[in-house]
Image: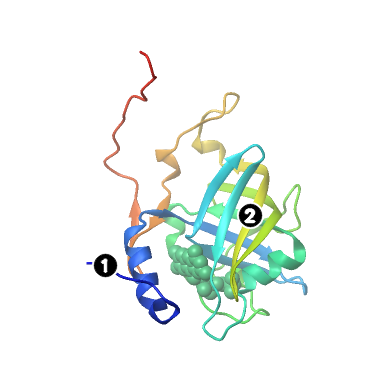
Amino acid sequence: MRYDLTPETRTLGYKLLTATVTPRPIGWVTSVSPGGIVNAAPYSFFNVMGDAPPVVALGIMGRPDGSLKDTARNILTAKDFVVNLVSRDLAEAMNVTCIDAPPEVSEIDLAKLETLPGAHVAAPRIARAPVSFECVMQQVVETGPVQRLLIGEVKAIHIADACLLDPERGHVDTTGLDLIARMHGAGWYAQARNLFELERPVYGK
Ligand SMILES: Cc1cc2nc3c(=O)[nH]c(=O)nc-3n(C[C@H](O)[C@H](O)[C@H](O)COP(=O)(O)O)c2cc1C
């Protein structure tokens, strides 16, 4: 079966892309509105995109009414944000924060979350998140009329002490982070299970 995508097949394209590009990591983004309201929302069009400098990207779609989502608007104004990663015990709280609340309502309050201040950015991080990246906006790509690809430079990484095997050498207990990822449909998630290892080939060996 071949599906040709056009502006008219937007919903179908979304369904097919999100049902196939799986599992997707979830960037739980905290940002601050011009009025000082702390906003939190999950974004699974998220990944790390480089290390020199270290950068992450967020794909933020437009709202059905043709406006920018609060996260995009806040980051474009404040120029910074925090990406928090979501452990299984935070899944329900993360889900609360995807609500389409108006800009004056803080999803942090709705989900009864606590935050901690950033060292490099004005946006706070979610205290219980096992990992948080403090990011300064580096570039914005207008991928659609109200769709933005936001690229942020990571200025600091916070990792819960309990999830570090060797802090000096930067060895992380990756499975111990117990991170969840987004799967297909509106509400399916995955946990990293059934891991396997492959030896990386070296040419000429
Ligand atoms: C797990 C999860 C992942 C999501 N990923 C995205 C995404 O990558 N891009 C997007 O535009 N919306 C995504 N959404 C929807 C937004 O979280 C939702 O529109 C939210 O209300 C936006 O909040 P904001 O206006 O405060 O930024 C996702 C929702 C969930 C539950």
Residue carrying label 1 = 2
Q: Is residue 183 visible?
A: yes
Query: How crowded is the residue under tag 1: few (<14 C-alpha within 10 Å), some, or many (20+)?
Result: few
Q: Amino acid at mark 2?
A: Ile
* Residue under the point 34% across and 60% down: 183
Please tell me whether mark 1 sits on a helix, a strand or a loop.
Answer: loop
Q: Is residue 177 left or right of residue 131?
A: left
Q: Nearer the viewer, residue 47 or 149?
A: 149
Q: Is residue 125 visible?
A: no
Q: Quadrant of residue 67?
A: bottom right
* Residue 196 location (% of width, % of height): 28, 34
8 relative to 16, above or below? below
Q: Nearer the viewer, residue 145 or 200?
A: 145
Q: Nearer the viewer, residue 185 or 109?
A: 185
Q: Earlier in the sequence, mark 1 or mark 2?
A: 1
* Residue under the point 60% across and 24% down: 168
Quarter of the image that includes the N terminus: bottom left
Residue carrying label 2 = 151
Residue 170 image label: none
Quarter of the image that includes the C terminus: top left
Q: Is residue 152 left or right of residue 183?
A: right
